[in-house]
Amino acid sequence: MRFFDIFKKKDKKDADIENSLNDYFHKLEKYKKLNKGEVGSIPDVDLKTAVMSWIRGKFNEDWTNQYEVIESLPKPCRHVYACCTVIDEVSNGGLNQLFFNSTGQFAHGIQTLFQSHRDIDNNRSIIILDWQ
């Protein structure tokens, strides 16, 4: 991309991407103030975004209170946060990133969560988490 390309008219693809990002950021702000009664009306496709936005909306700007906030949440909310965090961290940077970032402080809770859900084939996950 050259410098003056920024003045070109956006094509449909660029406009679609921009609209999609704007929609996503709007949802993040909207769901920071989520009420328990609203959860049932959230479309399935937006549920993860809604819950994670609500949880992350409780963090300080620098996330220094992350551990305290997560520990103060009801158990189902902690489970959602743990599952989403594992998926996000491993998808982004591998299992090592999960333990390297601040989310590593939740590793024991994640292991406990996986062990408590025996209906899922998670034996390999437990072994990997034990290794860390």
Image: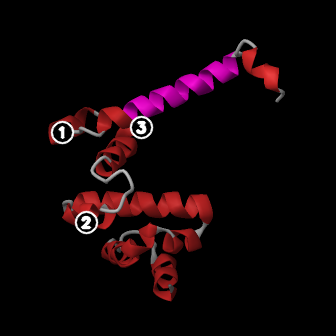
Q: Is residue 22 magenta?
A: yes
Residue type beneath disc 1: Asn
Mark 3 falls on what kind of element? helix
For marks 2 and 1, give the one nearer the viewer: 2
Residue farthest to the bottom, as pictured? 131
State which tag comes first along the sequence, 2 or 1: 1
State which tag comes first along the sequence, 2 or 3: 3
Visible in this render: residue 23? yes
- Mark 3 lies on residue: 45
Pinpoint residue 105: horizontal percent, then vertical percent: 39, 74
- Mark 2 lies on residue: 68
Mark 1 falls on what kind of element? loop
Residue 50's quadrant in the figure?
Answer: top left
Pinpoint residue 69: horizontal percent, then vertical percent: 25, 60
Residue type beneath disc 3: Val
Tag 1 near tag 3, CB within 8 Å: no
Q: Nearer the viewer, residue 23 or 129?
A: 23
How far is mark 1 from mark 3, CA to CA? Answer: 18 Å
Residue type beneath disc 2: Glu
